Image: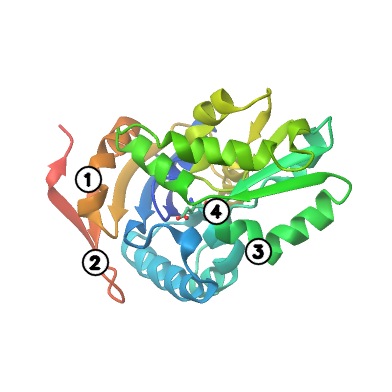
Amino acid sequence: MVNGAKRVLVFDSGVGGLSVLDAIVASGHALELDYAADNDWLPYGLKSDEQLRARVPALLSRLVDQWAPEAVVVACNTASTIALEPVRAALNVPVVGVVPPVKPAAALTRTGVIGLLATPATVQRAYTSDLITQFAADKRVIRFGSSALVDAAERKLRGEPANQSAITEAIEGLFGAPGGAETDVVALACTHFPLLSAELAAASPRPCVWLDSGEAIARRLAHVLIAEQGTARLRRAGFTNAESARPSFKAFEARGFDVFASISAAPAFEATPLDDFRSA
Ligand code: DGL
């Protein structure tokens, strides 16, 4: 263990949390990072609020028991906007969630038109509407919900070509909406989407700022943990469907993860290292 390094669990439904993990690593703090993906339930954006409010706290509390992190990052907007309260109630460690970056987007826009790209669940949540009322009431906010983009990001990290039609559909949904041609800032309110920011920017009809919450979460985490400056160390990555996650293990290895684990079905959620997959 790095001296003084605090252990953190980063959680998402799939690979999206890697965009947040990358920002945490780039923030330069001495942390030990574990990652868990509930990919057996992917995509969260098509699950009901009730399902997520039951599943996410149960899964995270079992993982906290087993991996003993000092903080948990819910690196998923879909889970954060609905299940943060029950997650906090279930865990005895600090929980940092993701907030759709509406406030910084409102501060940045010059044209007054903001795009908000998220999962179908997040775009319609009261939480998101409240953020818009609070911070962007005087702006035009164009929301577009896409689960196909989540799948495109998953594919990209498996090394397959990202699904171009998902990207085209999202761009048309934003820029083709009434007033949308003036959009100059797009808030990426799903952690999978920063993994596609190059593809989205390339398909965009005009230059835009593609804004995500990664840096803000990294700052918040360092503050909550009073983390020391240093280098992050990546440790375990666990999956609720390890078999289907295998093709994306390379993307995890490339970041420095060297132990992969299979997380068993509810309610046990038992994390077992995969002996047949350790990097050299
Ligand atoms: N990465 C997640 C988010 O931030 C969820 C994607 C999904 O599972 O639908 O919303």
For the N terminus, the image quarter is top left
Residue annotated with mark 3? 125
Q: In the image, what residue occupies the spot 39% across and 58% down?
A: 42
Residue annotated with mark 2? 264
Closest to the camera, between mark 2 and mark 3, is: 3
Is the CB of mark 2 within 8 Å of ligand 1? no
For the C terminus, the image quarter is top left
Residue annotated with mark 4? 119
Q: What amino acid is labelled 4 in the image? A: Thr
Is the CB of mark 4 within 8 Å of ligand 1? yes
Above or below, 200 against 235 in this view is: above
Position of residue 147 measured from the top left corner of the image (x, y, whole percent): 48, 52
Position of residue 26 measured from the top left corner of the image (x, y, whole percent): 51, 31
Above or below, 26 against 166 in this view is: above
Q: What amino acid is labelled 1 in the image? A: Arg
Position of residue 117 measured from the top left corner of the image (x, y, whole percent): 61, 45
Q: What amino acid is labelled 2 in the image? A: Ser
Q: Are marks 4 and 2 in contact (CB under 8 Å)?
A: no
Q: What amino acid is labelled 3 in the image? A: Arg
Above or below, 157 against 129 in this view is: above
Distance in Å between CA atoms under marks 1 and 3: 32 Å
Closest to the camera, between mark 1 and mark 4, is: 4
Q: Residues within 10 Å of mark 1 (few under 14, many from 20)?
A: few
- 208 vs 269, left or right, is right
Q: Are marks 2 and 3 in contact (CB under 8 Å)?
A: no
Residue annotated with mark 1? 246
In terms of sequence position, does the residue under pointer 2 or pointer 1 come before the other? 1
